[in-house]
Image (cartoon, helix red, strand yellow):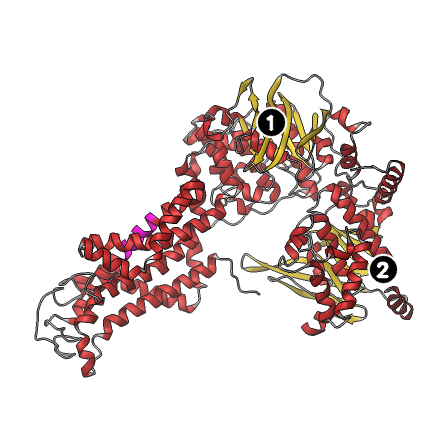
Amino acid sequence: MSTERETDMAASAPAEPLLTMRGLRIEGFADEAWHEIVKGLDLTLHRGEVLGLIGESGAGKSTVGLAAMGYARPGCRISGGEIVFDGQDIMALSEAGRRRLRGVRVAYVAQSAAASFNPAHRLIDQYAEAAVAHGVMSEAEARREAVELYGKLNLPDPETFGRRYPHQVSGGQLQRAMVAMAMACRPDLIVFDEPTTALDVTTQIEVLAAIKDVVREFDTAALYITHDLAVVSQLADRIMVLRYGELVEEGETRALLEHPRREYTRRLLAVRTLRKEEETGAGNVLLRVHDVSASYAGLVTVLDNVTVQVPRGRTVAVVGESGSGKSTLARVITGLLPPLSGGVMFHDEPLPPALANRDRQALRRLQMIYQMPDTALNPRQRVRDIIGRPLEFYLGLRGAERERRVRELLQMIELDPDAFADRYPGELSGGQKQRICIARALAAEPDLIICDEVTSALDQLVAEEILKLLLRLQKELQVSYLFITHDIATVRAIADDIVVMHNGRVVEQGTKAEILSPPHHDYTELLLSSVPEMDPDWLDGVLAERETLEEESPAGAP
Amino acid sequence: MSDDATGPVPHAPERGIPEDEELIIEQAPPERRSRWAVMGREFLRAPWTAKIGLAVILVYVFVALFAPLLTPYGESEIVGMEFEPWGGAFMLGTDNLGRDMFTRLIYGARNTIGIAFMTTCLAFLIGGAAGLMAAAVAGWVDQALARIVDVLMAIPQLIFALLLLTIFGTSIPVLIIVIAVLDSTRVFRLARAVGMNVAVMDFVEAARLRGEGLGWIMGREILPNILPPLVAEFGLRFCFVFLLISALSFLGLGIQPPTADWGSMVRDNATLITYGDITPLLPAGAIALLTVAVNFVVDWFLHKTSGLRDEH
C-alpha cells in the first residue's frame, strides 16, 4: 500500500542513497567545555536498507541516530559535516523545514517506550497525532490504519488495543505500539534507538520479529542502534561498529560476523562465550531457603513455596523474566521482606526473618550487590569511605589499618588505590562503580554475596570483565554467590547450579549441566531459545521452529 | 583519612585488565580541585544579580558585627530633641524619643538579623531532623509527624504567632522558639519530600542491610544528598522569618523597646510620613534590600543545584 510512493521515488533516482552523512562532527558540552562526541563520521544508507549501528555506551551511536533527523540533544550541537536526506541538506533547512521531515519521512523509536508515551492519552490518539498534525491523513484514516498496523505487529485485539492507555499494556506491547506509531506516515527512514534493550529476552524476540516483519513489508530503510551485535545481526543488511565517536569497522552483516577485521569487533563477537569450568562435588549447604511464600502487603503472592539451596563456595543462578519473583527472593533472604511462611537457614541456623532482629555477624556474612551501580553508591561519599565503612562497622578497623585494607581491596578489584581512593562515584565509569560495590561487599568478609542483576546495566564487554572478576574472587576467597539474572548467557558464564523461576515458583532446578542440556522444561526451553545468537539466521530459525512446535501441539509453548 | 596515612602495600597493584593496548578502558583521573577553588570559580561565573546580592549581604553582616564601632552614640541613648531633621550631629535625624536614627538603624541590623538567623537555624534543626526522620523511618512515624505538621500549618502563621506570644510573653527566647517552631513546619515538608527521594535509593538500602542505625542513615546517607535544596530553602526561610519578626515588632509583639529593631522603628516614627519626611522608610528599605539580596543569591544557588542549565 505504501510501497507505491517509495518505488516511484526509488525509480526516479535509483543510485542516489536515501541518507548520507559526510564528516559528521557533533560536540557535547560537559565540564565547562565542548567535547567532540562524534568525530567525523561518514555514513551512507540506501533505500530499504537496514543499517546497524553498534557500540558501547559513549560510542556516539544514539547521537548519530538523532542527527539523521537533523536533531541534536540539548547540550549537544552539530558542529561540522553535512547530512543529506533524500537530496536535501537538512542542516541547511530551517527548523520548521526539519520538523516537516520528522515523523513523516524520518521516524524515531526510542529505547524506553514507557517513558516516551504520554501516560494521559490513549495509544491510538497518540498514534494519530503526528499524521494528522502533518496533514498526511485524516483522523479517521489514521485510526483505520492504526488498527491494521496493530494487527501486523501481532498486538492482541488490534480493534480495541488502541483504546488502552500506556500503563494498561505490557512493555513489549508498548514498544510495538511505538513501532506502529513510527510507521504511521510510512516514513522512508526509521531510527530504532535500542528498542529492545529494556525488555526481557522472551519479549525481545517478539519485538524483534515484529520490527523485522514491518520493515521488510514496507521496505523502509532503518538505522538500528544497539550495543548487542547478536540482536542487530538479525535485522541489519550492513553493520557499522562505532567506538568513541569513530568508525571501527563497517561491512555486510554476514561478512562482518565471519571475518571481523578489527580486534574490537572480535571482542564484541566473543561476548557471551565466557564459561565457568565445571566444578566437582558440591560443598556443604551454606544457605537454605525452605518453603518460602511471600507477598507484598498481603495482597499479591510473589513467592509460592520456594526452596533453594546455596552450597559453600559455589554459585547458584536464579533465572527468570521480570515478575518471576527472583528479586523478591533476595529481599526475603536479606530480611527486607519477612516471608509469610517458611524460613531461611544460614550456617545451619535459622536466620531471624526480619532485618531488625539479625545480629551484626549474620549481617556481615550476607552481603549484596545491586543492579544499578549508580544508585547503589552514595554520590557524596568518597570511594575510601564507601569501602572503609564496612571495615569499621563490622571489623572495627580504624586509621592506618583501615586505610591499608581499603587499598588491598581496591587492588583485589583491579583498581589503582592511588588513583581511585579519593574519587566520588560521579567520577567513575559504570564498570568501575560496580567494582567498588563488589569491594564494599568483600570488605565485610562475607560467606555469601547476593548479586542482583549486577551486569545487566553494563555494556557487554564491561559486564564480562565484572563476571571474570567475580569468578576470580570466588576462587581466591571461596565465597558463595546467589546470582539473580534474566540472562542465560550470564548464567552460562558464572553458575554452578541453576534455579529457574516463573510466576513466583521454582520451575526447575539442578546443576548447570542438568538444566542446560535437553530435555528442558517448557519454560526453560523458552528462555534458552530466546537468547540471541551471533547468527543472522537465528531469529528466523527460532520463529520457524516455534511455529512448527505450535502446530504439532496446539497447547504449545507458554 | 589524610594522604600520609597509607600503610605498607603488601603486593604490587595489578593495574588494569590484561588485554590489548588498544582496548584499555581507562579515563584520565579528574582534576583535583579544592572546594574553595571551585567555589571561587563558580562565584566569578555567577550572574551580576548574585554578586550584588552577596555583596549586600556581606555589608549587612559586617555592619551587624561591628555595630558598636560604626555608631557615634549608644543604642538607646537619648541624645537630642525628638524628631530632629537630617544633618548636623545626627546624620539621619532623631526618632520619637530623641535617639539617633543612624545609630539605631545599625544596631537594628544586629538585633533583627541576629534574631532572624538564630530563629531560622532553630527552625531547620527541628524541621530538618523531623523531616529526615519521617523520610528514613517512614510508616507510622512519618504519618504521625506529617499530621502534627498539617495541624500546625492549618492555622494562619501570623495569628498563631500573635496568640502564642500573648500567652508566653514577648521575651526574645520565647520569640525565637515560637517563630522557629511555626516555621519548622515548612522545613519539615521540604526535608521530608526530598529525603524520601533519596531514602528509596539502593545505597540507603545497602546501609540498612549493613545494620546501620537511624542516625547514620539520616545524617550520613540522606542528609548530604539533600543539602543543596535545604541550603536554598534556608535563604528563603530566613527572609520570611525576618519579615515575620519585623511584622510582629511593628504590631508591638516582637522585639521589645528599648532594643533597636527595624520593625518597631517604622512604627514609632510612622507619623513623620504625614509631614513628607522619608525617615521611617529607611528601616523598611533596609528590610526590603536585604530580602531582595538574599533572594538573588538563593535564585543563583537554586539554579546551580537544581540542574536547570542554560542550553548551549
Secondary structure beneath disc 1? strand
Q: Nearer the viewer, residue A392 or B254?
A: B254
Residue A250 rendering spot, x and y as whole percentages: 81, 52
Residue A24 rendering spot, x and y as whole percentages: 72, 62
Q: Categorize mark 2 by other alpha carbons within 10 Å: few (<14), some (14-19), many (20+).
A: some
Q: Which residues are magenta?
A: B116-126
Q: Chain of mark 1?
A: A
Residue for badge 2: A218
Q: CA distance from mark 2 to mark 1?
A: 51 Å
* Image quarter of the C terminus of chain A: top right
Q: Is residue B218 above or below residue A10?
A: above
Secondary structure beneath disc 2? helix
Q: Is residue B44 above or below residue A474?
A: below
Q: Chain of mark 2?
A: A
Residue A115 included in the magenta stretch of the image: no
Residue for badge 1: A292
The quadrant in which residue B3 appears is top left
The quadrant in which residue B143 appears is top left
Q: Nearer the viewer, residue A402 or A513?
A: A513
Q: Categorize mark 1 by other alpha carbons within 10 Å: few (<14), some (14-19), many (20+).
A: many
Contact between labelled residues 1 and 2, with CB atoms less than 8 Å apart: no
Residue B90 rendering spot, x and y as whole percentages: 14, 75
